[in-house]
Amino acid sequence: MKKIVSFCLIVSAVVAKSQTWSTNEQYIQQFAPYAVEEMELYKIPASITLAQGLLETAGGQSRLAQQGKNHFGIKCKETWTGKTMSHTDDAPNECFRVYDSPRDSYRDHSLFLTQRKHYSPLFLLNVKDYKAWAYGLKKAGYATSPTYAPALIKRIEQYKLYEFDEIPSSQVYTLLLQRYPDLKNDAEFMAKLGPKNVNIDRPNLAKEAETKKSYAQQAPSTPKKSTPKEILEDILLKNHPNGDLKYIVIPDKINLSYISKKFGIAESRLMKYNELTSRVLQKNQILFLESKNSSSQEKTYVAQAGETMHDIAQKFAIKLSKLYKKNRMNEGQQPKAGQLVYLDSKKPRN
């Protein structure tokens, strides 16, 4: 794909001005947290999202990224009603989406992939198989360049972006600090890191994981489980784009009672808000701390293999009963892979 690249350096919001990191490294420092958050919500490998961002924006320097906050080269398409800009890519003066912030671009990228049926085969792949995802994106028609998949893989391996596929969002800043120790001089970055995570003398997370794996193979004993206190420390309060609702992503298996005490919300309310049938919460489970909405800002969604209606209701912050009604389904019915699920208006009658 043709890229228009400016030659003035972009200074990342999380980078100390005195450093000489490459623009690609600065890009990773700034946007890795977004990629991992999107992976938790939408099961798109963080390595793939970051590699696409690096490639599409030339490390944050492209005209689309700087003027349109568009980090993934997403064109207007027939469904886009937001701001636009003209940009020469595969053809002269094509219509591209314009966002209010890079964060919006990252979210729209996730929705772009999850809401289009021809990308649904990607979600049958292992979320850690970045090579399969790279070639799957090219096969699905994301880009016209014949070298698009190898270009993504090259960036993933050059910058070890696969490490971000292995960690929760609560550990992203720790990993970044281990990679770039001089970030300790950046006050804004350290504020995001948080005092409990400051430990720059720890080894690289990937090497640490390999060491643990090696020990486990040599002495197959029962792995140490995280305590409720440790799990609660890793929980980050987030705002869902559908109505700015407060929610958390559970970092490890824990009982609902601990969440109830931490946030001062009755268990019965949490059960109702999230349509729970069990008080045992699982890793990566989405939990809302307030009542969900009756509809979504998004119109439709393509169900992925193995997803339940409850999964989709949590992903888009919609009440489960409303989701069933919109899709003219009986409660308890589950969608098939590739099924178009209506999130806003009611499904048309056949």
Image (cartoon, helix red, strand yellow):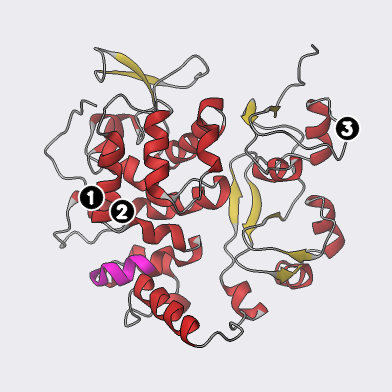
The spot of residue 100 in percent (x, y) is 42, 34
Residue in the image at 73% along x and 22% along y: 345
Callout 3 secondary element: loop
> Which residue range is magenta in the image?
175-182
Q: Amino acid at mark 1?
A: Asn
Q: Badges 2 and 3: C-beta atoms under 8 Å apart? A: no
Q: Is residue 66 above or below residue 270?
A: above
Image quarter hosting the C terminus: top right
Q: Nearer the viewer, residue 158 or 82?
A: 158
Question: In this view of the protein, can residue 94 be seen by the observer?
Answer: yes
Q: Which mark is residue 88?
A: none
Q: Which mark is residue 330?
A: 3
Callout 1 secondary element: helix
Q: Badges 3 and 1: C-beta atoms under 8 Å apart? A: no
Residue in the image at 57% along x and 63% along y: 236
Report the magenta stretch's main SS.
helix
